[in-house]
Image (cartoon, rainbow, N blue to C red):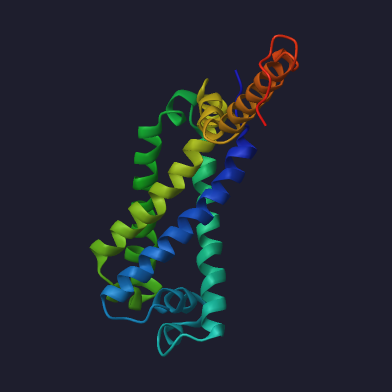
Amino acid sequence: MAQLSRKKIIREGVIAGLIGGAMLAAGQTLAAALRGLEPGAPWMLASSLALGRAGAEGRLDFGHFLVGTIIHFGLAAFFGLVFGWIVAQISRPVRNNLTLELAGGLIYGLVLWVINQEILGRLFYPWYLEFSAPVQAVLHGLFYGVPLATWLALRIRDVEVPGVHEARHRYQTSSGDDEYLRLLQEQQFRRAETETFGRRLPPEGEGRPPTLH
């Protein structure tokens, strides 16, 4: 039975982390807008990890956006790598259980929120505590942890769970290639029928009524 290597799972974890990072950025942007903050506030907040509190103040410019993007997605990829490494150590029956893996992703996102904001934030980045803790918990759990686990679970199940890859392939081709082949066969059948019917028509004067002019 096929099995995904640990190296492959970890690599998929990095990709999953980037996807989760994109979802988290979208959620943070929406939360900032609902609070009346500038849409670029999440990128400025991320840049403040390197630039200090000054990075979280003022208006967003290209420098803040670039630094914030690098930090945000760099951390998202790193945490995805860690999650992939954890999943790679788990036995196949557990990691192939979609419900358990999604629950694990949710818990993982909440753990990251506790460590990064409630612990490290209080010690080194107190301005992070100005944002609503319940909102940040939801964002880290549902917008990062769940998408992270979803991508990784689907990639693993595609290889390790019998029938999943075949079912996905049939679904992807049923509305495209299969429909094209059906139409092509139908056209060929009609063409053959027309040609056969034309050959069977007797020529005029051999049992065929004369044509009126």
- Tell me if residue 157 can be seen: yes
Q: Position of residue 204 (x, y in %)?
A: 74, 17
**Residue located at (40% from left, 37% from top):** 101
Foreground of the two, 58 or 211? 211
On screen, residue 33 above or below 169: below
Identity of the residue furthest to the bottom in this view: 58
Image quadrant in which the C terminus is located: top right
In-image side of 208 versus 125 (left or right)? right
Residue 12 percent across, percent down from the top left: 58, 44
Residue 81: tell me if it is visible.
no
- Please tell me which residue lies in front, 166 or 144: 166
The picture places residue 74, in percent across and down from the top left corner, at 56, 63
Q: Is residue 65 left or right of residue 27?
A: right
Q: Is residue 150 above or below residue 70?
A: above
Quarter assignment of residue 33: bottom left
Residue 108 lies, with reference to residue 45, above or below; the image says above
Instruction: Name the outermost residue toward the front.
Output: 213
Q: Residue at x 35, y 64 (%)?
A: 119
Total marks in image: 0
Q: What residue is rendered at 41% in x and 90% in y?
A: 58
Quadrant for the N terminus in the image: top right
- Left/right placement of residue 191 relative to residue 154 reads right
Judging depth in this view, the residue of 28 and 181 nearest the camera is 181
Residue that protrudes farthest toward the top in the picture = 207
x then y, percent, for residue 210? 68, 20
208 in relation to 178, above or below: above
Q: Residue at x 49, y 45 (%)?
A: 83
Left or right: residue 93 compared with residue 13: left
